């Protein structure tokens, strides 16, 4: 929530996240990868297979919905390994594109994804409505 109030965790966030991951683990169109240090999780990456609108030539792509590495374990190669794993899994499924979102104010995240050869191609716009 420091960067944007939208990202404040809900009171029951950890339990809801566990339920979400359990659902993903049963989904053949999703993958959850863990980065481990001495058998302790220090990061994760969630990737799903998504569909483009049917009017486009390109049909499917991989989408990294969430990736995080504990702050104490950043800049040690875990994020790179997780993202490379997501790319490898997408390629193994015959996909030729992977996408993700990074907050426009997350300069370290933007630098990381640029270092992984990701490019900006669309701006996500929003409006809070009441």
Image (cartoon, rainbow, N blue to C red):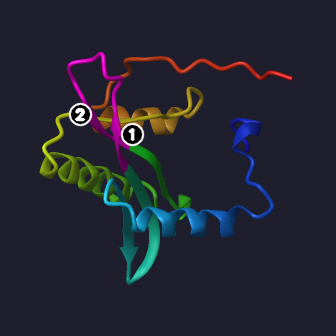
Q: Residue at x 73, y 42 (%)?
A: 2
The local crowd at label 1, few if under 14, some if 14 to 19, many if 20 or more residues have their Cα within 10 Å, is: some
**Residue bearing mark 1:** 112
Q: Residue most toward the right? A: 130
Which percent across, then down, holds residue 3? 69, 37
Q: CA distance from mark 2 to mark 1?
A: 18 Å
Which percent across, then down, holds residue 11? 81, 61
Q: Is residue 85 magenta?
A: no
* Badge 2 vs badge 1, beta-carbon distance below 8 Å: no
Q: Residue most toward the front? A: 54
Q: Is residue 54 magenta?
A: yes
Q: Residue at x 47, y 34 (%)?
A: 101
- Residue 91 in the figure: left or right of residue 5: left
Disc 1 on helix, strand or loop?
helix
- Residue 10 in the figure: left or right of residue 60: right
Disc 2 on helix, strand or loop?
loop
In front of the other: 92 or 119: 92
Q: Is residue 3 above or below residue 36?
A: above
Which percent across, then down, holds residue 28? 31, 60
Q: Residue at x 39, y 39 (%)?
A: 112
Quarter of the image holding residue 5? top right
The local crowd at label 2, few if under 14, some if 14 to 19, many if 20 or more residues have their Cα within 10 Å, is: few
Q: Residue at x 86, y 23 (%)?
A: 130
Looking at the rendered image, the disc whose residue lies closer to the viewer, 2 or 1, is 2
Q: Quadrant of the N terminus?
A: top right
Magenta stretch: give its range: 48-63
Q: Is residue 64 above or below residue 59?
A: below
Which percent across, then down, holds residue 85? 25, 56
**Residue bearing mark 2:** 97
In front of the other: 119 or 129: 129
């Amino acid at each position: 929530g420091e960067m944007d109030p939208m990202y404040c965790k809900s009171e029951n966030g950890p339990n809801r996240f566990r339920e979400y991951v359990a659902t993903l683990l049963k989904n053949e169109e999703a993958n959850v990868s863990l980065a481990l240090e001495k058998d302790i999780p220090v990061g994760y990456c969630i990737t799903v297979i998504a569909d483009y609108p049917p009017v486009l030539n390109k049909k499917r792509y991989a989408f990294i919905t969430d990736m995080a590495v504990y702050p104490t374990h950043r800049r040690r190669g875990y994020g790179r390994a997780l993202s490379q794993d997501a790319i490898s899994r997408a390629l193994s499924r015959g996909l030729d594109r992977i996408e993700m979102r990074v907050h426009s104010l997350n300069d370290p995240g933007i630098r990381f994804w640029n270092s992984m050869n990701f490019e900006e191609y669309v701006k996500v716009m929003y409006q809070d409505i009441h």
